[in-house]
Amino acid sequence: MSETVPPLMRGISQAMGHLSRRQHVIAQNIANSDTPGFKAREMEAPSFAYMVDAGGAPHVSRPQVQLTGGMKALGASQQTAAGIIPDEDVTETKPDGNNVTLEEQVMKLGAIQAEFAALTNLYRKQMQLMKTAVGKNGGG
């Protein structure tokens, strides 16, 4: 995003993108709820550290590891997608090794919907404030 975009708007945009990716991962969990051995996955929480960095303070980001042939020969595997991690918050595992519980996944989808609605309202209110500040809020 552009440097002229306020940090709050960038944060809202990043959070909405995270919720979209998280919804996709949960949909994959639901689709694989009967796949033997499938393990539920979740998205890592996004970092909003850039919003509190003071005056260009040094920023440390998560390293990106590229597997070499030697690493693969030793049994290492590439992460499927950035930010997707095993879901540690599971309550049961079926005898076939699958640990996806439909009820838990549907509850997570409901939470995502509520968070997205809250972010949408926050975005809308921020836009109204910006319009008011520049005098374009329909007042003539």
Image (tube, helix red, strand yellow):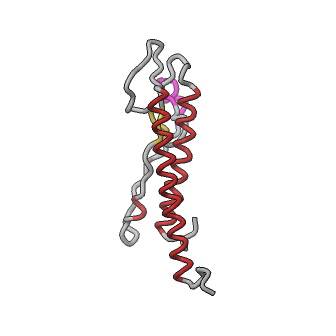
| Up/down of 134 relative to 47, above or below | below
Residue 70: image location, x then y, percent = 51, 28
Question: Is 71 inside the magenta-drawn segment?
Answer: yes
Residue range (magenta): 67-77
**Residue 22 at least partly seen:** yes
| Up/down of 43 relative to 125, above or below | above
Question: Is 72 inside the magenta-drawn segment?
Answer: yes
**Residue 65 at least partly seen:** no
| Up/down of 43 relative to 86, above or below | below
Instruction: Return the residue found at the far front.
Output: 139
Identify the residue at image location x=42%, y=53%.
47
Query: Could you say which quadrant of the image residue 140 lies in?
Result: bottom right
Residue 100: image location, x then y, percent = 47, 25
Instruction: Return the residue found at the far top.
Output: 95
Q: Which quarter of the image is occupied by the N terminus? A: bottom right
Residue 123: image location, x then y, percent = 52, 64
Q: Is residue 73 left or right of residue 140?
A: left
Identify the residue at image location x=47%, y=66%.
8
Identify the residue at image location x=55%, y=52%.
17
Identify the residue at image location x=58%, y=80%.
137
